[in-house]
Image: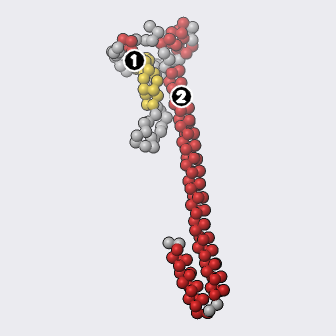
Amino acid sequence: MNCVPLAGVFVMVGIYGGMRSDWTMAVAMAAMSGFSVVGSIVGRLIQRKSHEKEAKENEAAYAAALDQKRAELEHLRQEQQRIRTNTDPDLATLLARASSRDPRLWERRPEDADFLNVRLGIGNLPSTVVVSAPHPDMPDPCLCVAPQLFRLADDIGADVTGNRSRTKPKNA
């Protein structure tokens, strides 16, 4: 495409030089037109390199932003897991609290939403941090080691079944 204007310039130079019989002006016109074409080609190459550099910088900035969000989400997941574990401790922690008469042993009242909740073990629970997965193949975040609760206030009875080594308390 860049050759069409250049060919047109040479045709004009030939016509101008042939009509006037003065080729000095025609050669100067051809040189200026050639510089114009070369300048536009060089400008396009520089523009392309600049665009590629900007695209790489944008990709790097986006990747850094994703890494920062991942770190924030991981911190929130760990904090939520810590809070859930502290709120619903394991049997060994509860026994230690009872033995030392820890005041936290009596921190739940009948009007509390978690009154008479009993920890049955650990398992996967959905995170309360609201995150929408950007891609359908990307899983929603979950707490993979969270206390599993049984609400005695609402339920009349419960059975725990399964392999004895997996259903008995770890310290028993």
Q: Is residue 134 visible?
A: yes
The tag earlier along the polypeptide, 1 or 2, is 2
Is residue 26 depicted above or below 88 in this figure?
A: below
Viewer-closest of 39 and 71: 39
Q: Position of residue 14 (x, y in %)?
A: 56, 86
Viewer-closest of 44 and 25: 25
**Badge 1 element:** loop
Q: Quadrant of the C terminus?
A: top left
Viewer-closest of 40 and 55: 40
Q: Nearer the viewer, mark 1 or mark 2?
A: 2
Q: Which residue occupies 51% across, 26% down?
A: 81
Q: Which mark is residue 152?
A: 1
Is residue 78 depicted above or below 96 in this figure?
A: below
**Badge 2 element:** helix
Q: Amino acid at mark 1?
A: Leu
Label 2 neighbour load within 10 Å: few <14, some 14-19, many 20+: few
Q: Position of residue 7 (x, y in %)?
A: 53, 79
Q: Which residue occupies 64% across, 78% down?
A: 32
Is residue 137 depicted above or below 145 in this figure?
A: below
CA separation, marks 1 and 2?
28 Å
Q: Which residue occupies 42% across, 36% down?
A: 139
Pointer 1 and pointer 2: residues touching (CB < 8 Å)?
no
Q: Position of residue 33 (x, y in %)?
A: 61, 78
Q: Which residue is mark 2?
A: 78
Q: Position of residue 91 (x, y in %)?
A: 48, 12
Q: Which residue occupies 43% across, 12% down?
A: 169
Total numbered labels placed on residues in the image: 2
Colouring convention used in this rendered image of the protein: secondary structure
Is residue 139 depicted above or below 159 in this figure?
A: below
Q: Is residue 111 visible?
A: no
Q: Amino acid at mark 2?
A: Gln
